[in-house]
Amino acid sequence: MSDLSVIARIPKKDILVGGEQHSGWLPVGASMPMPEPIRTVSFSFEIQFDGSGFLLCYQSFDGKLYGDTWHETLREAQQAACEEFGIQSNEWQTE
């Protein structure tokens, strides 16, 4: 198992989440659920190096929302953070 090293982090960033329409299966005759409410959620972000690529890792402060994505380069990880969360390159704190 390779050691992960943190390359950059954002200790706290507030992100708007929600507003998505229901996209799953519904029984015949069921009413369409309302969209998820839009709310502000505080997240922490890290970009970690796993020995072969970069992980963009994120977790909400309440622990209910979290995930990671793998990228070949640091630039690709930062671009994904920008596209998904609106994080600009100057927001990252480097280790």
Image (cartoon, helix red, strand yellow):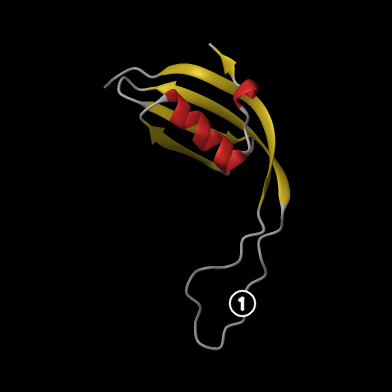
Say which residue appears at 57% left-offset and 21% top-offset: 9
Give the percent coordinates (x, y) of residue 58.
54, 34
Residue 77 located left or right of residue 92: left
Q: Say if 82 sits above or below 11 in the image.
A: below
Q: Residues within 10 Å of mark 1 (few under 14, many from 20)?
A: few
Identify the residue at image location x=48%, y=40%: 67
Q: Position of residue 60 (x, y in %)?
A: 61, 37
Residue 20: which quarter of the image? Answer: bottom right
Residue holding disc 1: 32
Q: Position of residue 81 (x, y in %)?
A: 54, 35
At 48% from the left edge and 17% from the top edge, which residue is drawn? 7
Which residue is situated farthest in the bottom direction here? Answer: 29
Amino acid at the residue labelled 1: Met
On the image, the x and y values in percent for residue 59 come to 56, 35
Residue 19 relative to residue 26: left or right:
right
The quarter of the rendered structure image containing the N terminus is top left
Depth order, front residue of 64/35: 35
- Mark 1: secondary structure: loop
- Classify 43 as above or below 8: below
Q: Nearer the viewer, residue 76 or 55?
A: 76
